[in-house]
Amino acid sequence: MTPLHRREFLAAIVAAPAAASAFQANDRITVGVIGCGGMGSSHAKTLAGRKDVAVACVCDPDRNRANAAAKSVEGASGRAPKAVQDLRAILEDKSVEAVWIATCDHWHAPAAILAADAGKHVYVEKPCSHNLREGRLMIESARRNGKVMQVGTQRRSSECTQKAVQALRDGVIGEVLVSKAWNSQLRRDIGKARPAEPPAHLDYDLWVGPAPRRPYQPNLLPYNWHWFFDFGTGDIGNDGVHQIDVARWGLGVETLPVRAAGIGGKLFFDDDQEFPDTHTMAFEFAGKDGKKKMLLYEQRIWSPYSQEGEENGDAFYGTRGMMIVGRQGWQVYGKANEPGPNFKGGVSLVPHHSNFLECIRTGARPNADIEINHLSSALCHLGNIVARTGRALKIDPAKEAVEGDEEAARLLRRTYREGHWAVPKGA
C-alpha cells in the first residue's frame, strides 16, 4: 500500500482552508457508509480496520447488501454497526460526524448536499455529480456548512501521481500542451430486458430516489445502472473520470474548457445501454495568458487489448518529450523516444481516506476537494452532451454555461421526481 506523504505541491492545488475543526489528532471519528455495493463495501471494510474510525452505520436500499456490509465491518473491527435502508437514518444520527457516499451516480449530489446540510463531513464517490449543475451546488453546500468534501478520485492522494505531476511542473518534458486520457477495456453485453417486479430485499423506490420514476428491470441492478441516462454517467463518468482528472491535473488547467467537440456512440453493443461504448472527445482550454491547451479522451469499452501498455491511462505531450502514466507508475520519453525518468507505484484507498480524515481534524481542504473534482466531472458531463446532441459546444467557463445551444444547455441539469425530499435546492 502507498504510504501517506506530505504533499510538496499541495498549496498549488488547494484553495483556502475549510472552517476550523474541533477534532484532535487522537480522536476517533464516527462515520456512516451510504451505499454498500462493491466500492461501498470496500470503503466500509477498510475503514473498519482503522483505529481512528468507528463505523457506526451502513446503509443500502438493498437490505441484503446492508446486512452483508455490517457483517464485514463487525468481522474487521469487532463492532457491529447498524444496518439501515434509508440514508435519512444516518443523516439524523447526531453521533455520525462524517459519511462515505458510494451510491449510484444519481444519488451522489443529493446525498452529499443533504449530509453537509446535516452537519456531516462528506467523502463522495466519483463522478461527484450526475450533471454539471449539481457539482456547483455541492461546492456551495460544502462551503456554507464549513464541511470537508472529498471525492473518490484516489489518484490525487497517490505518491506516484503526485510525483508525476510535480515532474511535469518541473519541466521534465518541457511545456505541456496536450494531455490524453483513455479508457480501453472489455465490458459485457447487458442484454435487453422488460419491466419486472423488484426483488423483495430491495426498496426500489428508495433506490430511484429523486430521479424520475421508471419501472425496475432485471438488467438494471446491481451494476448496469451506470449505462442508463437517469441513473449513471456512462463509462466516461464511471472509469474515465479517473484518467480525465489526472489529465486535467497534469495539463495544469483549472477552469472549464472553452470548447468541447467529438463523437460518441454505440459501435459494438446491441443491448439496453444508453451511453456510448465508444467516445472520442477533445476539450480546448484558454489556459493561462490566453495560451490554448488541449485535453483528449478516448474510450473503447469493447477492446480486449491495451493502449500504450495501459488498459486505462494518461499521456502528456510536451515540447521536449512525453510522459505515460498508468496504474503502476509512469515513464518519460525524450527525443526519439529515448527512455527518461520513471517511477513505480500503485494506488490505494488508504492514503485518500487518511487525507480526508486529516482534513476533518485540521480544517484544511482535501486533495480531491469537491471544487477540484467538479471541474473533472464536468468534462465527463460535457462529453456526454456532445455525444447526445451530436454537436460541438461553445462554453463560458466563468458562467459554467453552454452558449448558443438551448438543447445542450438543458442537459447541464436534469429532471427530478417532482416533490421528492432529496431534490437539491437550486437544481
Image: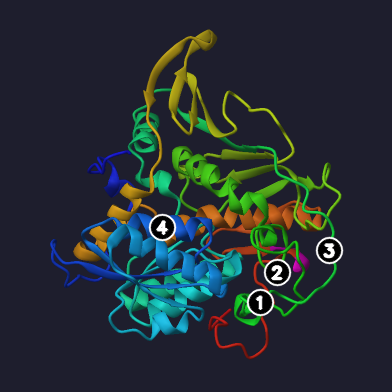
Tell whether 147 sits left or right of 310: left
Q: Amino acid at mark 1?
A: Ala
| Residue at disc 4, secondary structure | helix
Does the CB distance between marks 4 and 3 fall below 8 Å?
A: no
Q: Earlier in the sequence, mark 4 or mark 3?
A: 4
Does the CB distance between marks 1 and 3 fall below 8 Å?
A: no
Label 2 packing within 10 angstroms: few (<14), some (14-19), many (20+): many
Query: Which residue corresponds to mark 2?
Result: 230
Label 4 packing within 10 angstroms: few (<14), some (14-19), many (20+): many
Label 3 packing within 10 angstroms: few (<14), some (14-19), many (20+): few
- Image depth: mark 3 or mark 2 in front: 3
- Image depth: mark 1 or mark 3 in front: 3
Query: Which residue corresponds to mark 1?
Result: 211
- Identify the residue at horizontal 37%, vertical 31% (top origin): 345
Q: Amino acid at mark 2?
A: Asp
Q: Amino acid at mark 4?
A: His
Whole-angstrom CA distance, mark 1 to mark 3, is 20 Å
